[in-house]
Amino acid sequence: MNTTLTPPIALKKPFKLEKHGDVRTDDYYWMNERDHPDVLAYLEAENTYYEQMTAHTKPLQQQLFEEMKARIKEDDESVPFKYNGYWYYTRFEMGKNYPLYCRRKDTMLAPEEIMFDNNEMALGHSYFKQAGYSVSENNELAAFGTDTVSRRQYTIQVKNLKTGELYPEKIENTTGRAIWAGDNKTFFYTRKDPQTLRSNQIYRHTLGTSVADDILVYEELDETFDVGIFKSKSREFIFIGASSTLTSEYRYTRANGPDFDFEIIQERTRGLEYGISHYEDYFYLVTNADDATNFKLVKTPVSATAKENWVEVIPHREDTLLEDIEIFEEFLVVEERREGLNQINIKRWDGKEDYYLDFDSETYTAYTGINPDFDTIYLRYAFNALDTPASVISFNMVTKEKEVLKEAEVLGGKFDKANYESRRLWATADDGVKIPISIVYRKGISLDGSNPLLQYAYSSYGITTDPSFSSSRLSLLDAGFVFAIAHVRGSEYLGRTWYEDGKLLKKRNTFTDFIACSQFLIETGYTSSSNLFAYGGSAGGLLMGAIINMAPHLYKGVIASVPFVDVVTTMLDDSIPLTTSEYDEWGNPNDPEYYEYMKSYSPYDQVTPREYPNILVTTGYHDSQVQYWEPAKWVARLRENNLADTKIFFETNMDAGHGGASGRFEALKETAKDYAFLMDLAGKSK
């Protein structure tokens, strides 16, 4: 490592921010001005410094990239699924970055139709992403959305799948998804607010007409809500959903029209959440109504949908989180979570059978896959674990026989599941609560504290990180790293209350839980503070920022990807994308109580002179979820206050957004950079 280079010194231009009589001084507020020459110059200087300081790891980065790429089946293909007379699948070609979306009529022996070749569509763009596709009922037209900026503002177009013709309409600033009505000429789509990027409007478009004449079907005026549109599995109904963190509301219309007048199912009531499915004469709703914290299943007649008509199908259970359902002609399939583990429950509608699939593993991931057909006895589900590659399985719900349709291949000839071990451990938090940890390592390690360990968590918004397999991660495991997922409060790993105890005025539990897991892993000999590394992205990047302020001595190095770190300033600015819709997650700092609580953990506000660990911060210039200036300002303040002889690196991908680089190989290069940073600090080489 070149230690003679001087890191960039950001200009200090004090800017006063006052709220509730409290004054904060932000010396780096000027970085908020996108495209300003001074901002661009600073970001480029940081990129140059990072490149120069890590130049010695370039061979390792390349080696890691080649190693990870060699494990991937480059000409891979998804398991086909049948929908409306066609078999649909996605495949990759050797050496190419992007997928091809394909189909075959009636049978997989029929000629292949390439609907979209993203490799051709991406030509001339430094970033490209297609937001799937939606095929009309007559199978002749496909609406699709593309983003070439990485700001998640998709342009919808329509392609004639018979002729290959692209229709002239281009609908900009959408979510990229379109829902066809039954007439093969009408589709619905969601537009975004051009400034906040909130999904706030549903429009109806008729093929062959001007986009300017599109009809506004629904507009969400409450700035804390987003909207979306989808079709029922039965293809009989189109639903508009409006949701905030705590509340949901749906409207429906017949997919065949002709009037497309949307009727409300149940008016929003703060704290009432429900999701909706259709079967025969009923709507089925997964809901938390009437204090069903872990959710229950109810049904209501299509002709009478208000809450007073809801009839319980599956009651609320204190020990089981009801996550989702899948409806078939003869069976109801229920996805649940009990003691942190995924469960799949299969019930016959006639009540003659009710059983669970058996997953013989201590820690794993299982979920239902793509099941578009009603009239089938086959359930498609997926299974994998930290030490087990993903499988797609077809399960006969009558005979209980299963067929593995595909198991992900790990090429290169070196992977053997028997060489790895995954376990679930339990740490104890400051308040006595037990915190689960999913862990994987190569067999034969000594629990003497000498192992480098990478600890990961996200744990916000109720999003649960299940223990899943990664072929890229094998590079770390084979180098002697232990990998651990800390299932801290803020996710729904142990049910809905696990989430409630890690948000709003209890958010600090997420941070202290993570630290408790770190201390436990050190105490039990899985690692030591000189060998412990942490990683988190987005809201998990906020977690990284909090732990290095609260317990910097525990970590050798930290990677924070697209980190949400300037919490107070961002949540006070309702012009920034996502701000208003997230008040129910973080709180509204216009309220003094939430202001003070946020400020108490906000990574940017809590940076003070102390010895910080080695840090790598990455972001995307076009990020619409966490603006680039948050990590940029944070790095500048960290450098100014760091008392340790450690390195703080900052890299901005000038062509990417929140999800990083597009294309499977470009994304691997970013992973290789992260791993090289960790391995260099751990003194590991390939």
Image: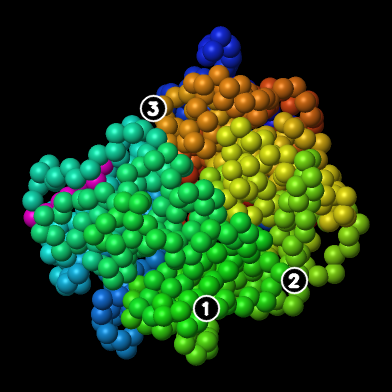
For label 3, the crowd category at 10 Å Cα-Cα, with few meaning under 14, some 14 to 19 and many 20 or more, is few
Q: CA distance from mark 1 to mark 3?
A: 50 Å
> Amino acid under label 1?
Asp
Side (left or right) of 263 relative to 490: left
Give the label on residue 354, or none: 1
Between 502 and 675, which is closer to the camera in this rendering?
502
Judging by the rendered image, the residue that carries numbered circle 3 is: 575
Residues under labels 2 and 1: Cα distance?
35 Å
- Judged from the image, the secondary structure of the residue bearing numbered disc 2 is strand
Residues at discs 2 and 3 in contact (Cβ within 8 Å) = no
Task: Using the rendered view, name the quadrant where residue 432 is placed.
Answer: top right
* Residue extending furthest toward the front: 308
Q: Is residue 367 magenta?
A: no
The spot of residue 326 in percent (x, y) is 42, 69
Looking at the picture, how far across and down is residue 110, in whole percent? 28, 86
Residue at the limit of the structure toward the left, as seen here: 209
Please tell me whether residue 276 is drawn above or below residue 542 in the rendered image.
below
| Residue bearing the label numbered 2 | 420
Whole-percent x and y of residue 64? 65, 60
Is the residue under label 1 in contact with that under label 2 (CB below 8 Å)?
no
Of residues 318 and 21, the one drawn nearer to the viewer in this rendering: 318
Residue 38 seen: yes
The answer to which of marks 2 and 1 sits earlier in the sequence is 1
Closer to viewer: mark 2 or mark 3: 3
Secondary structure mostly seen in magenta is strand
Q: Nearer the viewer, mark 1 or mark 3?
A: 1
Along the line of sight, the residue nearer the viewer: 234 or 201: 234
Range covered by the magenta-colored residues: 201-208
